[in-house]
Image (cartoon, rainbow, N blue to C red):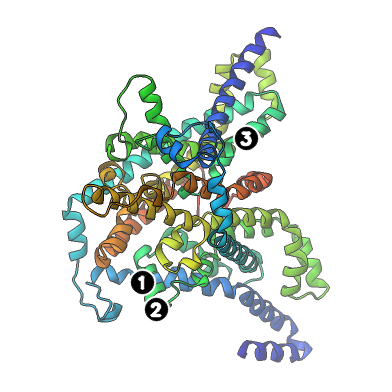
Amino acid sequence: MRKRQKPQFFLHSTAILYAIACIIPFLIVIAASLTHPLELSEKGYRLWPLKVDLSAYRTIFENPDTILRSYGVTIIVTLATVLFGLMFMSMAAYALARKNCSFRRPLSFFFFFTMLFSGGLVPTYIWITQFLKLQDTYWVMILPSLINVFHVFMIRTFFQRLPPSLYESAKMDGATEFVIYFKIALPLSLPVLATVAFFNTMGKWNDWSTGLYYLNDASLYPLQYLLYQIQKSIQTLLIAMNFTTTGMGAIPIEDIPGENLLMAMVVVASGPMLIVFPFFQKYFVKGLTLGAVKG
Amino acid sequence: MAVNLLVEKIERKPKVTKLMSSKKLDNIQLLLLALPAIVLVFVFAYVPMAGIVLAFKQFRVSLGVFGSPWVGLKNFEFYFKSADAWRTIRNTLGMNFLMIAVHLVFNIAFALLCFNLRSKHAIKVYQTVTIVPSFLSWVVVGYLVYALLKPAGGIMNQMIELLGGDPVKWYSVPNKWPIILLLTSLWHGVGSGSLFYFASLVTIEKDYFEAASLDGATKWQELRYIILPFLMPLIVILQILAIGNIFRADFGLFFNVTRDSGALYPTTDVIDTYIFRALISLGNIGMSAAVGVFQSIVGFVLILTTNYIVNKIEPDNAFF
């Protein structure tokens, strides 16, 4: 028995080291957000602040408009995408799962082909901006991401694995397809729906590239794109400074937002979700076993 | 409207033809159910496919897609004759190969580690903590990496100076970035990636291990003769799917973690970042469309090929 303790100890220490490596960057960012900007620029980043300074959080919470609006946009867009996406995807999945659907094969191919081939970024960009004119609208954040074909097939596979007798007896009782979908297939598929909802929530919450391509209107920035913009504008400012410090018109140092403010933004923007997501981890694991997809 | 009328008409039909009409009714209902998804996929996936013509045109906004003049393969030529083509293709393939191989090793190693732990509680804790990085967007990961690599005051340079070394200007030294990006993507992905293998490992019958330990098998032999053969189909499938996508790079990783720093392009510029820059910064719509088409076609061929191979090895796991 004693011989067996040693490897366990070794395994635990390796796992603990890895887990610490996963957490350390968060600690550094939190510590930086709690450090006075001058101290941060003089002493650099650390694992914990020497003196806790809440000025960054004070600045954010005294002018909460930007971040609150961003939270609002992100929540609206995520909710709309997940709810309508789940509805439309499960409806299509139901049609694909039903044996009595006579256009099942062509429809399946219609969806499946988009997993193999795509027009690419540029045609999509031109189509959305020049023809649909969706740039700077909520629509561009919602509509293109409603249907994830992979998830459609995942839900379909789940529907197919429900006992066929369920469908048959409902048919016998004269239920229409609408009723069977809504009253039988949907309620029995909550596990797969929860998994898809989880993946979509995570994907949409973390979506920043839609903003990068299609948003100029600052009042529509979702959180992640707001973070990107802040980083970008400070970068530009610093480059401009390097050019100007040698000449006239140097930007006074106190006008530049400190990096503590940046890091506090990161904490405020992504902290709440990081606390929420791990509770739904089981859906992530479930998704792995549900992932068996065949076209 | 028309469909509603049709439904009413069918419902009113006499009983004699009920069997046939109910089949029709089913189909109409199923079509209605699928319709929103069909429309969305058509609008956002199929219509842009037609936009591939842009790759063969010199696009001018004033002339529109249809009015812009055809230029044949000029756009492709422009890309392939530039030094960018070799650089972006090499970086995309090289980094993806590296990541696929190293992720595979680490995913399996961590899954095995968890599998060999006896405390169920500890497994849960480790898995919950290590999965947290994969919930982060690449923008946030970019910030975290910046805190480590900031030239003046970043953690890495502080450590280097503590050990008596010279600080490194990380964001302008391209040769360090393959390893930085690799580590970042491991940090982001191994926690969730290893779950695939862990979920599979726990389904191995315990009898095998009992029989093996009765026969005096070592841990190494267990791995070699029980675990690896059991995991092999999953390993093969996941790798082949990954290779099918090897021509697509993770845009967020390469764009945000590098802070799109021009000095790093020699090792970090991949096809996806190149297309983005050509489109947004240079406004060269024709060429970026051409590179996109090139990427799509190679990707298409790769997926068909890898799927063909999977079908030969393990038809059950084939994509289609």
Q: Are marks 1 and 2 in contact (CB under 8 Å)?
A: yes
Residue B41 drawn at (x, y percent): 50, 69
Q: Are marks 3 and 2 on the same chain?
A: no
In the rendered image, residue B128, in percent from the top left (x then y), is placed at 63, 37
**Left of A45 or right of it: where is A162?**
right
- State yes or no: discs 3 and 1 in contact (Cβ < 8 Å): no
Assign a secondary structure to mark 1.
helix
Q: Which chain does the numbered disc 1 sit on?
A: A
Q: Disc 2 residue type?
A: Phe
- Looking at the image, do the residues carrying marks 3 and 2 touch, with CB atoms under 8 Å apart? no
Around disc 1, counting alpha carbons within 10 Å, would you say few (fewer than 14), some (14 to 19), or many (20 or more)?
A: some
Quarter holding the N terminus of chain A is: top right
Q: How many neighbours does mark 2 have within 10 angstroms: few (below 14), some (14-19), or many (20 or more)?
A: few
Image: B259 above or below B151: below
Q: Nearer the viewer, residue B120 or B179?
A: B179
Camera sees residue B49: yes
**Whole-number angstrom distance, CA of label 1 to CA of label 2:** 7 Å
Q: Nearer the viewer, residue A173 or A263?
A: A263
Kind of residue at disc 1: Ile
Identify which residue, A39 or B152, lies in the foreground. Answer: A39
Q: Mark 3 points at which residue?
A: B127
Q: Taking the image as drawn, is residue B313 in sight?
A: no
Residue type marked 3: Gln
Residue with the mark numbered 1:
A126
**Residue named by callout 2:** A131
Q: Which residue lies furthest to the right in this view?
A: A173
